[in-house]
Amino acid sequence: MNREIEQAILTEGYRFCRVQPENIGVFYKYYQQGFHVVMMISLEDTQALTVEQHQVMQERVMDLFYHPQGRLADFPEGYPVYHVELLTLLSGNNTDMMHQLCCMQKNVWGYDMKQGRLIIYENQPGDFWGLKNALENCRAESKSTGSTNPGFSLKGLSYTTIAIAAINVIVYLILEILGDTQDPFYIASHGGMYPEFIQINHQWWRIFTAMFIHFGLPHLVNNMVIFCCVGSRLERAAGHFKMFVIYMLSGIGGGLLSYFMMLYSGDYAVSAGASGAVFGTIGGLIWVVIRHRGRFKGLTVKGMILMAVLSLYYGFSTIGIDNWCHVGGILTGFLVAMILYHKKVENC
C-alpha cells in the first residue's frame, strides 16, 4: 500500500528524495520561489515516534530546501528559496501514535493502512494543494482491474453535472428550432418567469421551468461553462445527490428573490436562465472550502469569494442582467450546503 500512496503523490507532480533513516521518504515540488514538501514516515518500521523526534526530522528536511545553493543533487544551484510548506504523512496501523502526533504538531496527516483511509484531524489543514483527493482515491484505484491509469476513476465522473448541462442544451435546441430564443415574448410564452403570470394566474411552476430556458446561445454557453467548472468540483466534494439538491433549490431560491424584488420595485421583466442555480453551486463550493478550513483542492475561501464578488459586480454593472436571481441563488446555495455538507472531522 505504501507504493500506492507514493505513486499517488508522484502523479501530483512531486519528485522523490530518499533520506535517512530508511522509513522516511521526502517528496517535493518546486513552484516559483519555494517548495511544497511531503515527508512520509512509515510507523511500521519504528517502535515509537515522539514529538521531539518528529520535530528534528522536520528541521532536517526543511534544511534540505532552505539553502542558498540547494542541497538536492538535481536542484539547480543559485535558485533562491523563500518559502517551504511541509506536510508530514504518517502511514501505518498505529492510529494511537498518529493521534498523539497530529494533536500536538501542525501540518500532520495520518494514513491508516489497515482501513485504507486518510485521517485528517480538525486542527490540521483540510487539504495540501490538491493532495487530499489523490490520497483518498489511491486505494479505490488500486482495486480496479483492467486499468493501470491512475487518473481514471468512474467514481470521479460528474454524472449529475453532465446530465443537468445536457438537459439545458436539449431544452435550448428544442426552443431554438421552434422559435426565437432571444425574443422575450417567446420565452415568456414557453416557461419564462414574468411576475404578472405568477401574481395573477398563480403560475408558480414558472420559477422552476425558467431555470432551463436561455436567451440565445451566448447566454446558454456562459452559464454552462461556469456550471461545468464549478458544479463538477462541488459534485466530487458533496456527491451526486447533494449537488443536485443544491442546484435545484438555488435556482428556485434565485427565482423567488427575483420575483419578489420585481414586485417591490415595480420593474417587471421576463426572467430566464440557469444563472441562479449556477451561482448556487458557487455558494455551495464556498461552504465546502470553508468547511475544509479554508483550503480545498487548490481552492481558497478568498479566491472563491473574490470570484463571486467579481461575478456579481459584473452583473450589477451590466444592463439586462437579473442580479437578484444571482444573489438569491448564491445565498440559497450557501445555506443549503451548510445543511447538507458536513465533512467528517477527526477530533483530538
Image: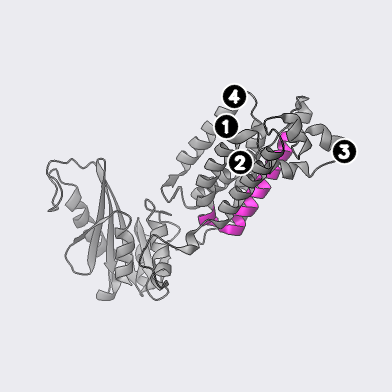
Mark 3 or mark 1, which is nearer the start of the sequence? 3
Q: Residues within 10 Å of mark 2 (few under 14, many from 20)?
A: many
Residue type marked 1: Leu
Residue 20 magenta: no
Tell me whether circle 1 and circle 2 mark residues in contact (CB < 8 Å): yes
Which disc number belongs to residue 312? Answer: 1
Using the numbered discs, state the Cα–Cα distance from disc 3 to disc 4 in whole angstroms.
Answer: 31 Å
Mark 2 or mark 1, which is nearer the start of the sequence? 1
Give the residue pinned by disc 2. 330
Query: Which image quadrant for residue 104?
Result: bottom left
Residue type marked 2: Ile
Residue at position x 58%, y 23% in the image: 317
Mark 1 or mark 4, which is nearer the start of the sequence? 1
Residue type marked 4: Thr
Dot in front, 2 or 4: 4
Q: Secondary structure at mark 3?
A: loop
Tell me whether circle 4 and circle 1 mark residues in contact (CB < 8 Å): no
Using the numbered discs, state the Cα–Cα distance from disc 4 to disc 1 in whole angstroms.
Answer: 10 Å
Residue 254 magenta: yes
Looking at the rendering, the stretch of residues picked out in magenta corresponds to 235-258
Which disc number belongs to residue 318? Answer: 4
Position of the N terminus by quadrant: bottom left
